[in-house]
């Protein structure tokens, strides 16, 4: 009975902190500028099914892709077992679903195979990260917390899967000995992996077996609940946000940039001979017009903020970025991490100051991202092509250039000349328009 | 265009030359090749000449949305004024902007990149190539322009043009979706690169040279400049040439000197 109360208490605590963090992230995402992405629903569902559910872009790099699919399947399918663990924990039952008979054995057996697969994949991932030390995991932005975060998750998964298999091994012995509470009868074929652990446990006394089984059971469930709370603080939040993020993917051609509506309004007015240049703003119009482009994280759209929280820092974008691979400061992954860190900071600022943002003298461009990074982008779209969940660092980079130019008139000198030439001669170079036809000679 | 309209004609196709094609000496040769091909295939086409103006692409990618939309409004007014329906561009940046960004601003046209248009002319039998031309059996690699390939999903048309030359097409290790940028996009063409340890075009030229191709084919005047510069930097200009698909077809059809 005590165990059930402790279990319910832990469940409630985990649920509380998870929900609290989710609401915080949701609120932060909604601090972003509004965009309407409610169109093309069928195409959106299809994209989500293909890219998130089907992992189509993960397998572009087959080794990481296949290992990731094993962990992904393991996570999704073993969660069926979680339902049973929840019921057993709350009601003090033991393997409550075992009444379904042979299908139950097949299910448990498949969980065991997956658990072993996940465990192996995590070991390989640790080796890739720390022993082979693949370059994209060692970029400057990966130092400290991001690297530790990845390691924590991989080690946690290994421990959880180990506990799961240990629990099954001890349980199968307990059930074989028909100990108190372990009176369920499950076929030995349900334990294709944990049977290899039987040798380690076989000589133990009844009470020791029960102790091992209970210890593994509790370690596993407490681990899973801690994991639940940890995930939304971590890059691993992608396991949830990958789905909405791909649903709201950009469905247009990759090279298409949006036409800013606010600018269109200005241009239309300039082109309209009947426009009144002295007209006052309409009644009810915003007193302060929104900023052109992005200077701080709240100038981004909610979709772009969602992208930042969805990023799992895999670094495929950075490894395909022509600027980054030729030694420039720009790293698309760092852009995404900076956006997330900044909007998180703004979120905490708002919470600490009575739900009102207190200016902190910082901004995304300047405090987190330098102009040098922004000007290194060639807009080649390799980063969005590489992203396994359709994040667009390029879109954010170009939006930040917009504020540099249209709000602050900060451009490298040759870019200023290019603008002037276009304005004066209709070409980025200083040639007169009249000589446009000269190639015919 | 103005002359055609004055004589009561309206062209089927407007050839949008672009700034590089109008002013850059190397790119002018590409422009000539495209014009010769259109003429040779009997396409009824016109150019805007002095009435053409920058599409605004470099301004937009550099963050100057205002200047971009001003250019767009101006160009759309000219194009709509002439009742233009179909456009062929000599540059993937013009192509992308006019195809994807102008419609929302009031300019809705059927826009083709020149590689697409030439591929169609070939498949329709409108272009006869010489029996014996320098590209037969030649080892050729194609550098995908970002704004044609990744940006607009067109990988097939330029390759079908190379196949029509009866040449040996070899792919670089990074091609199609994974093609590496030449380094000129996003207004980089008009400024110095940021501090780094290598120029992007040298990195890309290394990819191309690795294929041991005799010709690097391009479909963008800016890529052409960048790759030509990269080949020079590797001191390979004696062995490898950089040519636009249009130049190759015009040479193979023996319609250009």
Image (cartoon, rainbow, N blue to C red):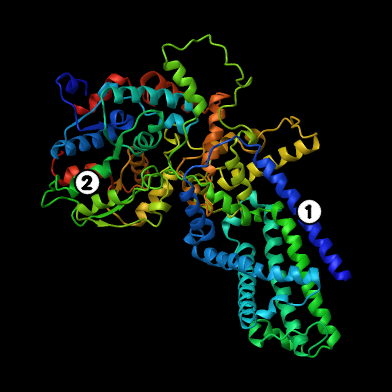
Q: Quadrant of the C terminus of chain B?
A: top left
Q: Which residue is mark 2?
A: B120
Dots 1 and 2 on the same chain: no
Q: Give A205 or B227, whichever is nearer the viewer.
A: A205
Q: Give A67 or A245, whichever is nearer the viewer.
A: A245
Tell whether A176 sits left or right of B189. Answer: right
Tell whether B231 sits left or right of A133. Answer: left
The spot of residue A70 in percent (x, y) is: 57, 68
Q: Residues within 10 Å of mark 2 (few under 14, many from 20)?
A: some
The spot of residue B1 in percent (x, y) is: 21, 24
Q: Secondary structure at mark 2?
A: helix
Q: Which residue is mark 1?
A: A16
Q: Secondary structure at mark 1?
A: helix
Does residue B240 appear in the picture of this structure? no
Q: Quadrant of residue A79?
A: bottom right
**Is there CB contact under 8 Å for labels 1 and 2?**
no
Chain bearing tag 2 is: B
């Amino acid at each position: 009975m005590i165990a059930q109360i402790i279990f319910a208490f832990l469940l409630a605590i985990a649920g509380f902190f998870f929900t609290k963090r989710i609401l915080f992230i949701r609120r932060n995402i909604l601090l972003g500028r509004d965009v309407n992405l409610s169109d093309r629903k069928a195409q959106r569902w299809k994209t989500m099914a293909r890219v998130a559910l089907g992992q189509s872009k993960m397998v572009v790099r087959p080794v990481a892709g296949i290992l990731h699919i094993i962990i992904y399947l393991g996570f999704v399918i073993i969660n069926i077992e979680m339902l049973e663990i929840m019921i057993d924990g709350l009601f003090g039952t033991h393997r409550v679903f075992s009444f379904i008979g042979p299908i139950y054995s097949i299910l448990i057996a498949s969980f065991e195979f997956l658990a072993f697969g996940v465990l192996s994949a995590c070991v390989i991932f640790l080796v890739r990260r720390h022993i082979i030390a693949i370059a994209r995991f060692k970029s400057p932005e990966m130092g400290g917390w991001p690297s530790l975060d990845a390691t924590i998750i991989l080690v946690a998964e290994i421990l959880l899967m180990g506990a799961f298999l240990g629990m099954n091994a001890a349980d199968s012995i307990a059930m074989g000995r028909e100990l108190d509470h372990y009176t369920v009868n499950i076929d030995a074929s349900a334990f294709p992996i944990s049977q290899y652990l039987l040798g380690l446990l076989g000589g133990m006394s009844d009470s020791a077996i029960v102790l091992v089984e209970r210890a593994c059971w509790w370690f596993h469930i407490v681990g899973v609940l801690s994991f639940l709370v940890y995930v939304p603080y971590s890059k691993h939040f992608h396991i949830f946000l990958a789905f909405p993020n791909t649903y709201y993917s950009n469905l247009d051609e990759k090279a298409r940039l949006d036409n800013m509506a606010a600018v269109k309004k200005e241009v239309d007015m300039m082109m309209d001979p009947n426009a009144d240049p002295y007209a006052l703003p309409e009644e009810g119009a915003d007193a302060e017009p929104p900023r052109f482009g992005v200077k701080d994280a709240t100038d981004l759209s909610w979709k772009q903020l969602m992208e930042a929280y969805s990023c799992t820092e895999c670094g495929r974008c950075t490894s395909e970025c022509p600027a980054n691979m030729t030694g420039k400061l720009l790293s698309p992954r760092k852009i995404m991490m900076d956006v997330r860190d900044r909007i998180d900071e703004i979120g905490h600022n708002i919470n600490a100051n009575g739900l009102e943002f207190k200016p902190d003298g910082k901004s995304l461009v300047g405090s987190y991202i330098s102009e040098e990074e922004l000007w290194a982008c060639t807009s080649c779209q390799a980063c969005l092509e590489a992203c396994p969940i359709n994040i667009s660092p390029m879109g954010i980079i170009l939006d930040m250039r917009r504020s540099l130019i249209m709000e602050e008139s900060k451009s490298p000198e040759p870019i200023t000349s290019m603008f002037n030439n276009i304005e004066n001669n209709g070409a980025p170079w200083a040639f007169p328009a009249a000589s446009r036809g000269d190639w015919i000679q | 265009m103005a002359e055609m309209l004055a004589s009561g004609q309206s062209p089927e196709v407007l050839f949008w030359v672009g700034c590089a094609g109008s002013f850059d000496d190397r790119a002018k040769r590409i422009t000539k090749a495209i014009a010769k091909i259109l003429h040779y295939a009997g396409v009824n086409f016109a150019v805007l000449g002095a009435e053409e103006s920058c599409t605004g692409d470099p301004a937009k990618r550099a963050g100057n949305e205002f200047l971009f939309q001003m250019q767009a409004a101006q160009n759309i007014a000219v194009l709509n004024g002439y009742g233009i329906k179909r456009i062929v561009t000599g540059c993937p940046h013009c192509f992308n902007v006019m195809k994807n960004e102008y419609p929302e601003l009031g300019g809705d046209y059927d826009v083709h990149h020149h590689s697409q248009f030439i591929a169609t002319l070939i498949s329709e039998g409108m272009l006869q190539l010489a029996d014996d031309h320098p590209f037969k059996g030649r080892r050729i690699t194609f550098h995908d322009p970002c704004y044609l390939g990744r940006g607009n999903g067109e990988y097939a048309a330029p390759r079908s043009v190379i196949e029509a030359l009866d040449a040996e097409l070899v792919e670089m290790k990074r091609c199609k979706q994974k093609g590496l940028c030449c380094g000129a996009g996003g207004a980089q063409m008009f400024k110095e690169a940021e501090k780094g340890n290598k120029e992007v075009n040298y990195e890309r030229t290394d990819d191309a040279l690795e294929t041991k191709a005799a010709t690097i084919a391009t479909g963008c005047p800016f890529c052409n400049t960048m790759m030509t510069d990269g080949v020079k930097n590797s001191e390979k200009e004696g062995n490898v040439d950089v040519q636009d698909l249009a130049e190759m077809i015009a040479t193979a059809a023996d319609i250009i000197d």
